[in-house]
Every structure is written in C-alpha cells, then in structure tokens.
Image (cartoon, coloured by chain):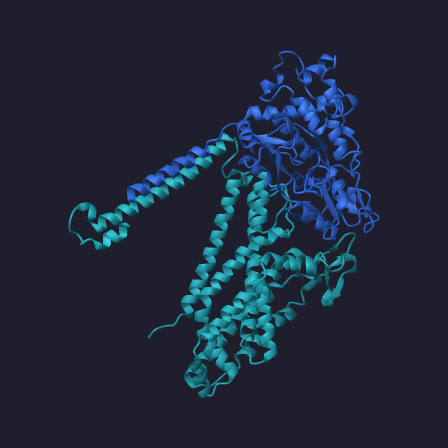
Amino acid sequence: MASQEVLREEPSRGSFINDPKVRGIFFQAVVVILLVAGVWWIVHNVIENLQRLHIASGFSFLKNRAGFDIPVRPIAYTSDSTYGDAIIVGLINTIIVALAGIVTATIIGFVVGIGRLSRNWLIRKICTVYVEVFRNIPPLLVIFFWYSGVLAVLPAPRDSFNLPFGSFLNQRGFYFPRAIWGEGSWLIFVALLVGIAMAWFVARTARQRQMATGQQFPVLWTSLALIVGLPLLAYALAGFPLSFDFPKQSTFNLTGGFQIGPEFLSLYLALSFYTAAFIAEIVRAGILGVSKGQTEAAGALGLRPGSILRLVVVPQAMRIVIPPLTSQYLNLTKNSSLAIAIGYPDLTAIAGTVLNQTGQAVEGVLIMMVVYLIISLVTSAVMNVVNARMALVER
Amino acid sequence: MKHIAIGILGAAALGWMASSASATTLGDVKAKGFIQCGVSTGLAGFSAPDDKGDWKGIDADFCRAVAAAVFGDGTKVKFTPLSAKERFTALQSGEIDILSRNTTWTINRDTALGLNFIGVTYYDGQGFMINAKKLPGVNSALQLSGAAVCVQSGTTTELNLADYFKANKMEYNPVVFEKLEEVNAAYDAGRCDVYTTDQSGLYGIRLTLSAPADHVVLPEIISKEPLGPAVRQGDDQWYHIVKWTYFALLQAEELGITQANVEELKTSDNPEIKRVLGQEAETKIGTDLGVSNDWVVNIVKAVGNYGEMFERNVGTGSPLKIARGINALWTKGGLQYAPPIR
C-alpha cells in the first residue's frame, strides 16, 4: 500500500504529493485527527447521555459523607468520613497487600528458583512440583483455596488454637498481642536508627578495607549486634517501657490485641504463592543464563560454591532477572483486585461500593483506572532505577 | 486507496452514531419481542431460579406481569441476574428494561442516579439473624456490641447498619462481600456472628443454610425498606406502563379478580370490574397507556392478582410463610393502595 509506493519513489523528486516527507506528515496528521475526534466523540457522547438520563456527574461526591464502614482500616476512618477517605483507605489496603505480597513472593521465588537447580534430587523435584502446580492454577482459585480450603476450616473463636506468646488462630483470623509503647520508648527507635546507620558505616569501611588490604571483617555479626543490641540496651535504659495488650475472649470474638483477618491472610498468601512460581522460573532462567565458564573460572580461583553463587552468579543473573521481575510485580499488584471475591476491602472493592452508593459509575471506574495506572508506573520507575544500577557498567 | 480507507472509517463512525440514538423503551421492547428484566442473583421468594432454571418470586413475577401487559404473554421475559453493585449501571446503560430486584426506594436513587421507582411491591425493613445455638443468650439486636456482622456491599443495608450501631454506641466488625451467595457462605461457615439484610431476605436465606433451625431472626427492625421496581428516567410512557401494571395487580385483588375467575368476570355486571378489564364500550384506557385494552386480563391470567402473587412466592403457599402484615391492601389495614383505574 502507501508505504510500498513510497519506497519505490525517488526521494524529493516529482510532484509535491509524492514527496515521502510530506506524505509522512500527512498520514501522521490524519491519524492524530482521527484519534482526537474519536476521543472527543466518546467523551461528548458520555456527557450527553448522562445529562439525558439525568444522572449526576462530576467529582464533588468525593467530599460527601460515606456512611458505610470498612472492615480493615489502616488509617482513621468511620462512617462519618468522606467517600474520598474511603477510597484512600482502599488504596492503602491495596498497597499493603501488594508490598507484603511482593516481598514474600520474591523470597519464595528466589528460594524455589535456586532450589530447582539444586543437586539434591528431592529438593529439585519438590520445587518443580511447586512451580507447576501454582503456575497452572488461576489466581482466583488459589485465593479461594486459601480462604475456603484452609482458613475457613479453622476452629470458631471459642475454640481457637492457642499459639505461643499469647497469640491465637481461628476462622476470624490471626490474633497476637499488640505492643503498647510506654513513655521513653522513643529512645528505642532512635537506638534502632543509630544501629542501622552504624551497621551501614561498618559495612562500607569493611568493604573498603577488603579492597585495599584483602582482609575480611565479620560484617554480618557486627551489624546484627548493632541493630539488635543497641535498641535492647536503650530498652533497658528507658526502664522497660513496653507492655502488651493480649487478645481476650469476649461474647462474640476475641477482643484486644492485633488482628489480621482471614481475608488479608488468604489474599496475601495466594498472591505470594502464585507469583512466586513465576518468579522462580525467572530466577532459574537468570541463573542458567550466566555462562558456565563464569562458575568454572570462579571455582578455579578457589572460591567456595556458596561464594560463587553469591559473588559471581547471582549478580550477573540479576541483570537478566530484573526486567521480567518488574512485570511480575505489576501483575501481583493488579491481581490484588481479586480481593473483591473474598471481601478484602482493597481499592476495587471500596471504589465499587462508592460507585454503587453514589451511582457515579463513570467517575468511579475512572478513579480506579488512574490509580492503578499510577501504582504501576511508580513500580516500573522504581524497578527501572534498580535495573540501571544493576546493569553492566562498560569501561 | 487512502480515500477508500477514510471513506470506510467515516461511514463506520456515522453508523456508530446512528445506532447510539435510541427510540422509546416500548418501541425497543416490542422490536426485540421480549422484556429484559434485571433480577437478583438468587433470593428465595423474590427472584431465584428453581431446579428447572425458571425464575420464581415476586420480583420475577412482576416482570412477567409487565410482559403480559405489553405482549399479552407473560413468558416474553428474559432475566438478567445482577449483583447489588451492577444493578443501577445495568439499568442506566439500557442493558435491562426494568430493574425488579428487591431494591430499596430512596431519594438519592430517584434523583442523582437517574432512575424512577414505580411504587412499592413489598414493604420491608432491615433485621438481624444470629445462630441461636452458638449464641444462646442473645435475644435483642442491642446485645450485638462487638459482633462480626456479615453484610452485602453497596446496599442501603450497609448504610443502615453503620447508622444503627453508631446511634446505639455499639462496636462491630463489618464483614463485607459483593455477592449475596458469598455473604451466605461466609455466615454459614461462621465467619461472622450476625447476618443483616431485609427481614424478608433473612427468612429466605435461612432456608438455604445448612441448619436452618439453629438460626433466629431478632425482633428489631431498624429501617424502612420499601422495595420496588425501577425504570430509567426520561421515558414517561414506559414508566406509566410499569407503574400501572403494579396498580392493576392491586386493583385486581381489591375487586376480587383472580387467575381462576378472570375470564368469567369479563361478563360481570359490576361497572368497575368491566372498566378495569377493558370490557367497557369504546374504552381507551389501555390504548392510551400504549398497550391493548384487555391488558389487565392478560396480567391477571399470567401471574394472578397481587395477593395471589404474594401468597404463592413469600406467603402461605411458599416455604417462607411470611404474613401479609403491612403488605395487605388498604382495605385490610395494610399499605398497598392503588389509584383508581378510570
């Protein structure tokens, strides 16, 4: 068609119409005009139809009183809060479950991925079965598996499983003591921050010293001592300000303490286990992508197998792993919208309720789309930064 | 080449615009040959499929009544099961012609949502159900502080629940699901202590639980829930047809016209019965409405009068055994009242 004709033309000769540059601009302009016209028509049509059907529109409803309660509230929220607050609660719930899921899925994924390459037959086969099972089941079923299959068969609140440290497990969720920070506990947090900063400093100095002299320093143990020891010391100095609120049996439920509902648990476990299967395959591909010569050369230099994996193979594998890993993180975040099936109040569930209470479907769906887009773009941006730091630096 | 392509695009765009302009609902319904009726995903007594897949219940029968008025045939209905969240969008977008889905009439839905409720086919109120075996000491909703309460999202129930517990200074943990079946399953599995929805719904849901006898409905009614069918705003003709179908059902009961005697009563001497059944000479009541003059005959033949519909689906003829109560006719101390058909 047009492009082939252009290829046969002699450049910038003949009539104006046959000039490839002009043609290019013309077709691009046509596409842009059609696109703008299409979008304008859709928007215009929607507005006109909404007016014709006497349906309220606009975003002012976000300031109205919501009137409904939300089971999981990471920030202060009551039925007197606004629809806008409700959507923010949903957004935070989505972010919490996505972050928790991403961390857990990454850990399980790396363990299983490396396990699939283990020399131990049993470990290798277990990891293969794990990947094949979870990769080939739709995520919604995995969520139902955890919600109905595992958590719902737990005992009723009256006959909860008693776990150590005053925690309980029953079909209403997992209850554990909530820490109450007394006076002077700010000292503990300061000590923790100082500990982390000092550990980082020690690690840097040790690395520099190893670069310069080749001498090693027990960084891990020193860091642990700093990060755990300093806050403990501060705790003692402040006069043991920490007390606990233990969950207790009441008429209906366990009250007090900190509760993690079965909806969050099953969604979190399902997303982690499901995505971990994909991450495991990505990790395996990444490790196999590092040429065998690297391992052999490292071995010839006298490094032990653990050090070969940590210092030679994994850093190179990361370059192959990170780009597809980003896609998995995005998938996990978007799959969290399946929460609606088990009643976890994530963004989709809350925005859906708001949409239904106000009847403003177009605005509700638009908010959901924009928010998910922003979450995904931010995730991508962060992963791009990580990728850039991991990338091979050419000298 | 490109001229042809642009021509095709232009024609497609024009065609698209032409198809988006809509005729009247009555015209659309007659053209497609059936009424698309939005119902619940399964609430016994109101709209639920039986073992043969036929939709049963007051809400389903109401759509059959409208089909009988329009087509003279109560079977010309197709049902669309909708969750609470989907229902208004389905009606607004024109996917369904009538929303007959145990939906509470509120001012917000009548105005901001662009709907028109046609009347109240069932006067209901919100109640609570608990498992009396697990919670033997509880016999009032005021003892429910601290309970986990199962509720369907996006309903007036959810809002009343928040208001009630706040007004009585009680705490509760909401357990919220989108679909009725999910709420039922969660309550049955013991995920929550209390189930709250319209009281008629509680009786229906109790029958579907694994041990119905263990569950009791608490006496408190915490809200007004006038349930009725709704249509889109901006089409008065369709609104009138649906509204007067409802009034015709009431009028038929008031005049003692039943499924069994409607043919016989066509020759009645009573002028009011003759008028309602379209047997008056030169009558224009039906045609003015946009349907045939024997529309009431068709309605009663298809589903009976309001009383018959009630008893068959939720009353003595059903497993629910709900008394008429405030849903009786005004002549019998209830609230059901129809303006005169004349």
Q: Is residue A179 above or below residue B336?
A: below
Q: Is residue A126 above or below residue A155?
A: below
Q: How many labels sit on residues?
A: 0
Q: Quadrant of the C terminus of chain A?
A: bottom left
Q: Is residue A131 visible?
A: yes
Visual hue assigned to chain A:
cyan
User: Residue A268's image quarter?
Assistant: bottom right
Q: Is residue B118 above or below residue A172?
A: above
- Letter of the chain shown blue in the rendering: B
User: Residue B14's image quarter?
Assistant: top left
Residue at point 32% right, 41% down? B6
Residue nearest the observer in this picture, A267 or B143: A267
**x and y, in percent, of residue A378 in the image:** 46, 57
Q: Is residue A258 visible?
A: no
Residue nearest the observer in this picture, B323 or B315: B315
Residue nearest the observer in this picture, B191 or B262: B262
**x and y, in percent, of residue B341 in the image:** 67, 17
Describe residue A87's horizontal placement relative to residue B1 as left or right.
Answer: right
**x and y, in percent, of residue B230 in the image:** 61, 31
Residue at point 56% right, 23% down? B237
